[in-house]
Amino acid sequence: MPEDIYVEMRQSILEGLVDRAAALARQAISAGVAPLDAIHAGYVPGMHAVGEQFAQGKMFLPDMMASASAMRAAMGVLDPELKKLGTERPMAGVVVLGTVEGDIHEIGKLLVGTLLTAHGFRVHDLGVNVTGETFAARASELNANVVGASALLTTTMRRQKSVVEALDRAGLRPQIKVMVGGAPVNRRWAEEIGADGYAKDAMSAVALTRDLMAHKPLALGQA
Ligand code: HCB
């Protein structure tokens, strides 16, 4: 059953079928499929296929938007299931997340936020198109331990450097760590811009956040 449903999930994303994507998510939960497996084996490969087809000129912007809506619908079902896990754990730290200025891609960031919440982190999602200054101001107000900046475009990944610089200017580093991620980003880029780490996916983001936290005391009880 899982392999078949994963194929259908991938297809629901490719075809941008909102109701179908959500129904498959509900079906998977009822059948005892782990929500994370559904995301990684079913829906995310669908998004990657959409990206490939768009790059090859076989899909267009409205198709990509429909696929994103289908992905959000599936996440709407799976998100609460994953987040339930977080309420059973002690607060692990505070993370401020956002997609950088000029960029409106949000699905990967939402997934990172869900998994961090599921692992006991208190996550403040600033949304999309977030300036470096806003990242710094909110991270300071919320007494964040880690800032996670997402960028999906080669033209916006340099804004991750603006996030690092804004935190530096505000005197918030090295206390607040910066984690970067997004499809065009890699470890070398993280090093080049002076970020504290790079995560290739949501599970790695959880491991990296834990790792970054291990080098400083927790801000327990804050925001
Ligand atoms: Co968009 N888009 N898009 N897009 N889009 C990409 C990103 C392309 C790669 C597609 C392609 O050409 N193959 C491409 C970028 C090319 C480039 O720069 N090299 C592209 C383009 C060109 C554009 C527009 C410019 C198209 C246009 O208008 N002509 C435009 C830009 C708008 C803007 O931001 N200013 C655009 C618009 C859109 C939407 C709105 C239609 C839609 C986004 C909807 C939304 O998010 N609400 C969209 C989508 C859906 C995509 C693709 C198909 C999927 C992105 C996605 O959700 N992936 C994407 C193709 C692709 O990425 N392969 C395509 C799934 C998630 C789960 O993966 O990589 O985002 P993720 O996140 C991972 C990982 O990176 C990491 O963990 C996540 C979870 O595992 N991670 C972090 C992410 N952020 C992190 C932060 C951390 O701190 C730590 C880890």
Image (cartoon, rainbow, N blue to C red):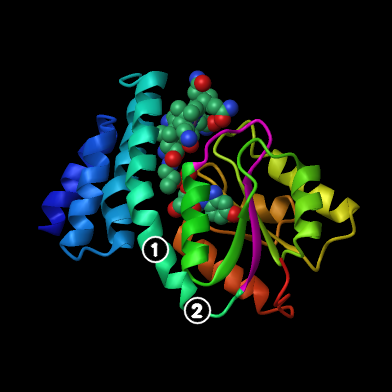
Residue at the location (47% across, 62% down)?
115
Depth order, front residue of 101/58: 101
Depth order, front residue of 41/24: 24
Q: What amino acid type should be assigned to the residue bearing mark 1?
A: Leu
How many discs mark residues in the rendered view? 2
Q: Quadrant of residue 45?
A: top left
Residue at the location (69% across, 45% down)?
160
Element carrying mark 1: helix
| In the image: residue 58, left or right of residue 167 | left
Q: What amino acid type should be assigned to the residue bearing mark 2?
A: Arg
Q: Which residue is mark 1?
A: 82
Q: Quadrant of residue 203?
A: bottom left
Q: How far apart are labels 1 and 2 at the CA level?
A: 13 Å
Residue 200 appearing in the image: no
Residue 58, horizontal then vertical, whole percent: 30, 20
Residue 207, horizontal then vertical, whole percent: 52, 70
Q: Which residue is mark 2?
A: 89
Tell me which numbered mark, 1 or 2, is placed earlier along the sequence: 1
Quadrant in the picture for the N terminus = bottom left
Quadrant in the picture for the C terminus = bottom right
| In the image: residue 10, left or right of residue 156 | left
The answer to if 104 sits in the magenta stretch is yes
- In magenta, the rendered stretch is 93-106
